[in-house]
Image: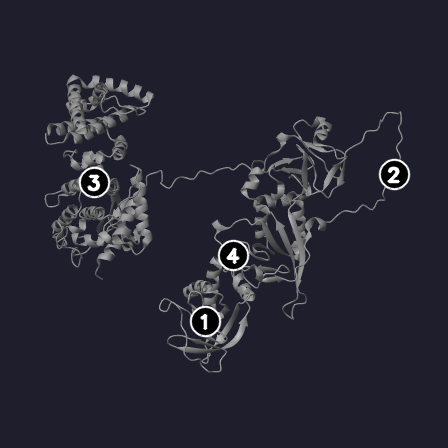
Amino acid sequence: MSETPQSLFEAFAAGFLRPLLGGQRVQLTRLLGPGLVPHFSVAQTADSSVDAAIYERLHQRASRHAPVRALGYPEPETRAFAMALHDLIALTDPMLDRVFARGARPKIVAFVEALLAATGAPRTRGEVLARHVLCDRALALRRRDVVVTNWAYTYRFFGRPVPRNVVAMPRLRRVKQKAEERELLAIFSQLDTEEMPLHTLLRGLLARSPFTRIARFSLDATPLFDVSTLAMLEDASLRQGLITELRQAHESKLMARLGGELWKLQLRRDVPPRLLRVAVVFVLELGLRLMLRRDPPDFVGAPSSFELGLALSLPAAALQARKLWPELALDDAERVTTGAQIWAAWAGDVPLREAKNMIAEATSEADLERAS
Amino acid sequence: MAPDARGVLLGDRGLLLFPSLDRLVAFLRAYAEQASLDELLSSLKIRQLVTPLKTREAALSFAAESSYRMDKLASVARLSGGLVFIGTSRHFVRYRDAASPLGYDVSELAQEAADLIVYDQAYRQSYSFERDIDLRSLLLRLDPISTPANRREQAPRLFVTAETGVGAAIIGYLFRWGVDAKVALVEWPSASAFEDRGTRLHVFDITDCPQRISALLVALPGVTVYAPEGPNVAVEFGFHHPVSLESCPSLFTSDSLSLLPRRGEALLVEPMPAFTPVESLVRADISQQDRPHTLRGEPSDSALESALSLRLAPSSDPWRNVVATVVRASQLDWLARMIYALPSDTLSSLRIAFTEGGDVYLHDAGGIEGVPLGEFACEVAPRVYVPAGFSLVPAVSPDVLLDLLGDREDGHVFFSHGAAQPARIPDHDFRPASRALLHEISTRVVSSAAPQEEPELSLFNYAEARRLPLFGLPGKDAPEGEPGA
């Protein structure tokens, strides 16, 4: 029986989206071509409870990061984003590495690229969060690989259930099973080739989900601060949500990366001061949040670098310049004042001076803009 | 037919012809709003007419005294869909209009055998009288119209009909609250041969009825409240008659009373029965004891050593300040059931005290009416209560009474029938009923909708393996105009 766009959508919503957000086993459907985007943009499932469950879970998970009143789901570009995610996972199917199926791989890569092209930058807080939730859940998926051996043969079932007849009469046929669960990101690393550029496609996905891109900064080595991420960081709620999300990250790697990104951003002369100011505020607030933790990091054993020093000098620089300094409760102000001095002492004079220059550049221009 | 002073052709009578009875009613409604129907009543006749082709129409005729009256009636009648004629005897010709300001006449009278012939420019129509319609009976047959709640006003005088079962209770109730009311018992013969007895109702005539009492009466089953719309006619409260009855008071004579319920037939009390004040109907206790002999007192030198004690005596005075009730231990189950049915405002103002003997004292400073249980007590002095229907004898003043109860402190003193000493309940023992009666509520923790723990990382399965994964796949090609096509 040939599939119709609607039957594919039903399978995609009930088999992929709902379990992905609900934490159940995800069942991929047939490949989703870019020609399905117009239909998927407006389609609804015949079982309305599926759409309701997807929306509810999406809203629940999005609300953990930032207050969001109403999500844009079903929003056409978010759906195209989810379709690209689906096809990217489907691309790792080992059964595509067969004689007649192998030719489909470049076409699936083209599918993902076309779907990503149909997905623009997020425009609202709801879109940012919806994409992050989808992307974050998908990157956490795992594949169960089972190898079944009997007295004569060996069968491999990678990401597929083991048929009952294969494991029937286990004693007689001396059936043995060996199962292993592999993370999707590990599979990407293993299968990434020039013909199948999984990492490139993944970076394309992350570029459409700025929240995920910074939250999973280790997945993407390209500059983190661009127009879409800085536009997202301008939203104070999203900024705070992202800072909360980053609390699990390794502090010295995180701060070093962000310090480096700040430095790169400042060196680019085409960046408006308003966007520089957003990036500085983000790194500054992240630093303050780290200081206010129950066990604030001391970076004593961290490898010394200019980038890390620049990020750690920002609190002290903001404190001395009396600019960009947020309003804090008295107890918190006392703690961060002490912490800023300790971090600045650890960083040294050069990063502190550059941090002051950066704050002066970001704020003076902003003040001028405001005055005009 | 002759012209009047203005030159307008007039006959003895004016005739308004309506295609149906409801149009005629519409005319009456409209006319009664701006003029008095009473002016027309002396010469008014309403008839149902029938044409030779058996079509029925309604006609209203009256004395055409002047062209001013005719003009006024004509304008309203035309607005209501009627035709206006003027004439004498059985011949009527079209009344003047804009096309002919002085009126119309006919050159030759028809000789047809008919009760009524009207002449218009384009036609001539003869009618026979079918029946006369009495205006009063017509008005009493009309259903009252609901009055919007924001336009309802408390009438200074109300008529109330009550079934005989509740009539006696209402008499006592009105008497207790000192309402100026009179009552009569009215009986109508049975309308059907299958009824063994006629209809009997108590009819109350209440003046200056407090709003709370009228609201109570309106809500009471078996009781209907009427608000007067004229001297001897009243319409059910919350409704008004479609025709302004105040414009025709002479229809309702003083020896009858017409009560119009919102649905059903009007109640006609005729002749008017004798209304008796409710005070005279309240049951009075008659002492069977002989009148004591008159004693002649003589001065005595000996000091008066015997002290008198206060006693309770039955009293026929209206109950006043009924603010407490005493619920005996045997009635506690009833009290418990009733507490669930009490409205929130009653429960919030109710204070309760439990005593050692199991009796429960309930107190509500605003009136204990909300708790129809137990022995009611009236407050005769601050925090001194006697059973309702009794009074203290000797009839000492409240100040003296308080002096006599010197050890009262801050307590509430309840006299009760048959007890040697009054009971004193300390004020702090009275607690709000809503707090004293309810157990503390233990709560159970319910987690919010969002699960706290992160669900386990999900596994995924690929789709069914195919030899040609893209064969027959819909949507392989990008839509036209889309990027990536």
- On residue A371, the disc is none
**Which circle, 4 or 1, is nearer the viewer?**
1
Q: Which residue is mark 3?
A: A209
Pointers 2 and 4 in contact (CB under 8 A)? no
Of tags 4 and 3, the one toward the viewer is 4
Name the amino acid type tagged 2: Thr
C-alpha span from label 4 to label 1: 42 Å
Pointer 4 residue: B240
Instruction: Give the labeled residue for mark 1.
Output: B2
Q: Position of residue A84 (x, y in %)?
A: 19, 47
Q: Position of residue A329 (x, y in %)?
A: 33, 23
The three-letter amino acid code for the residue at tag 3 is Ser
Side of A155 where B132 appears, left or right: right
Q: Is residue B359 above or below residue A265?
A: below
Position of A290 compared to A358: left or right?
Answer: right
Mark 4 element type: strand
* Quadrant where the N terminus of chain A is found in the figure: bottom left
Q: Quadrant of the C terminus of chain A?
A: top left
Q: Are marks 2 and 1 in contact (CB under 8 Å)?
A: no
Q: Nearer the viewer, mark 2 or mark 1?
A: 1
Q: Earlier in the sequence, mark 2 or mark 1?
A: 1
Q: Is residue B207 among the parts visible in the rendering?
A: yes
Query: Where is residue B75, by image quadrant?
Result: bottom left
Say which element carries label 3.
loop
* Mark 4 neighbour class, 10 Å CA radius: few under 14, some 14 to 19, many 20 or more: many
